[in-house]
Image (spheres, helix red, strand yellow):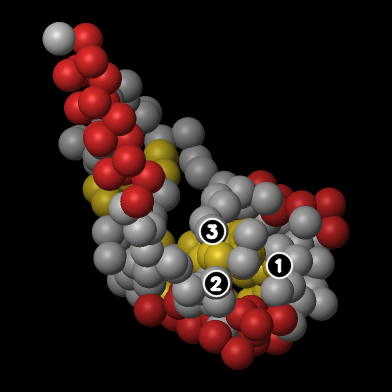
Amino acid sequence: MKSWMAAIAALSLAACASTPTPREDPRSGAVGVRSIDKLMPSDDRMQLADNETFQMPLAEAGNAVPVYPAELLAQRLAPQTVCLRVAIGADGRVMDSQPIDDVQAGCAIGSDARFVEAARAAAAQWRFDPAFRCVYPGAKPDEQGCVTGKEESVAVSLAFSFVFEQKDGKGSVRVGG
């Protein structure tokens, strides 16, 4: 009985070892993204009154990350971090994006311009549920959401970091910096 079980186990292992593994295209690229809102200058931050609250814009589920520029894949570049300030209108559409140069946050301008353009092209297509300020008629109540207040959609700017990288000859996603 033991020799029969050993033979089955040996055949099973041989079958696993002989199964070919599919090869991935070593030139594929991937992108990670993270929010870096703390880089926004304090002068640019919204100031709320005592009877107001603020709801950040919520990204729609279909917002795609940038595509790694195909013409750069063969160069096997080190990870490239591109940071953008993204202006989101009161309607939730992206109005504009501009590169951010902040060495402390790992956001040095100097990456290949094609990475910057890929990040800007993706961000231009993004949609959000708009940010809003909730204004209460009296003092701010202790409630979730804006049940007793009046919602006012507002335009905002957010900062994002995009990390373009390749690892071991193939693309990988790294969110963060």
Residue 30 in the figure: left or right of residue 138: right
* Location of mark 3 (residue): 172
Look at 31% across and 53% down and name the residue there: 19
Look at 41% across and 40% down and name the residue there: 52
Alpha-carbon neighbours of circle 1 within 10 Å: few (<14), some, or many (≥20)? many
Spatial separation of the CA atoms under disc 1 and disc 2: 18 Å
Label 1 sits on a secondary structure element that is: strand
* Pair 2/3: label in front: 2
Spatial separation of the CA atoms under disc 1 and disc 3: 13 Å
The amino acid sitting under disc 1 is Gln
Tell me if residue 72 can be seen.
yes
User: Closer to the N terminus: mark 2 or mark 3?
Assistant: 2
* Location of mark 2 (residue): 26
* Pair 1/3: label in front: 3
The picture places residue 177, in percent across and down from the top left corner, at 67, 50
Please tell me the numbered disc located at residue 113: none
Label 3 sits on a secondary structure element that is: loop
User: Closer to the N terminus: mark 1 or mark 2?
Assistant: 2
- Front residue of this view, candidates 139 and 79: 79
The amino acid sitting under disc 2 is Pro
User: Closer to the N terminus: mark 1 or mark 3?
Assistant: 1
User: In the rendered view, would you say 62 is above or below 53?
Assistant: below
Q: Are marks 1 and 3 in contact (CB under 8 Å)?
A: no
* Location of mark 1 (residue): 80
Tell me if residue 92 can be seen.
no
The picture places residue 129, in percent across and down from the top left corner, at 29, 60
User: In the rendered view, would you say 54 is above or below 128?
Assistant: above
Quadrant occupied by the N terminus: top left
Alpha-carbon neighbours of circle 3 within 10 Å: few (<14), some, or many (≥20)? some
Residue 115 in the figure: left or right of residue 65: right
* Pair 1/2: label in front: 2
